[in-house]
Amino acid sequence: MKRRKLFEKGAEGILLACALLSILTVVFITIFLFQRGLPLFSKTSILSFLFSTNWEPTATVPHYGILSFILGSIYVTGLSLVFAVPVGLSVGIYLAELAERRASRAIRSAVEILAGIPSVIYGLFGIVFISTVTRTLFGGTGYSLLSASIVLAIMTLPTIINVTEVSLRAVPRELKEGSLALGATHWQTIARVLVPAGRSGIIAGVVLGMGRALGETMAVLMVGGNAPIMPSGLTGKVRTLTMNIITDMSYAKGDHLTSLFTTGIVLFVFILALNLTVQLALKRSISSVEGGQGA
């Protein structure tokens, strides 16, 4: 008994240490990022940095404006989710409720392969195929907002599909059986019972996919055009926040280098605000559902 208690306490201590290490890692990253990026605001104002489109860090009189990069990130991420969410939800529902064993195995294998492909391979595929298709159908150079969004949509599909399937399978079987027993069809049960019951997990999957899209650099860099200008439409070139950091990091120094860390702060705050908003929305939806059930 003593050995068992010592073992349990030791295991509990190790798990606690790992949890604290994760928290400390986030804290240190946050401190480092803000420490390196905030000094830029002694040279330029926050409003000028966030709401100006003039990015000339190497000019005689440098200008640091990242509004075009912020909008580029929003446009690319939003459009990629428009493409990926309907497809990901459909495939996840099919795997959870409709697919036969052989078909589900084949589709899951394909999804796992998609998840394991390096981003640079997606970029090469975008250069050879997607950019060619968009150039043929819509004109332009093919290196555009539309091409980057399509590549990102393909990259985020595995996350949305897997989380959707797991969320639907986690719904209590009694809900499905009760719906069918009341005379609902299979499709009605899926649309009105299973999907609403698993929406918190589904939304989490979409948020994870959004985070993947926001943080992706290489594939977008290869097909987006990487022009430091305001996005001019679906066929226009685009540069995102992550693209701006990786493009200039190799030669940046001084205030230019500091501005890249400041860009990282903006990206960090943006993703943090997005996650907090989604968590609050999920808590409100869960509380409203519980309140309705109690009533």
Image (spheres, grey):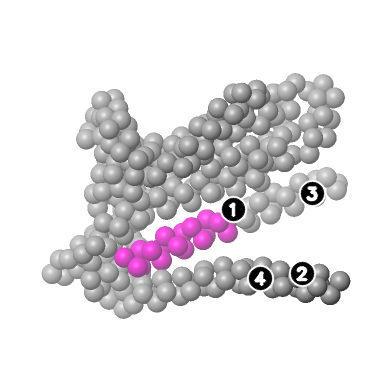
Query: Label 1 vs label 4: CA separation?
Result: 31 Å
Closest to the observer, 29 or 116? 116
Query: Label 3 vs label 1: CA separation?
Result: 18 Å
Residue 62 got which mark? none
The kind of secondary structure element at disc 4 is helix
Closest to the observer, 6 or 164? 6
Nearer to us: label 1 or label 2: 2
Query: Label 1 vs label 2: CA separation?
Result: 36 Å
The residue that label 3 is drawn on is 290
Q: Residues within 10 Å of mark 3 (few under 14, many from 20)?
A: few
Res. 176 image quadrant: top right
Identify which residue is drawn at 24% across, 49% down: 227
Q: Position of residue 217 (x, y in %)?
A: 35, 51
Residue 14 got which mark? 4
The residue that label 1 is drawn on is 278
Name the residue type under label 2. Answer: Glu
The residue that label 2 is drawn on is 8
**Marks 1 and 4, the one that precedes in the sequence:** 4
The magenta stretch is 260-277
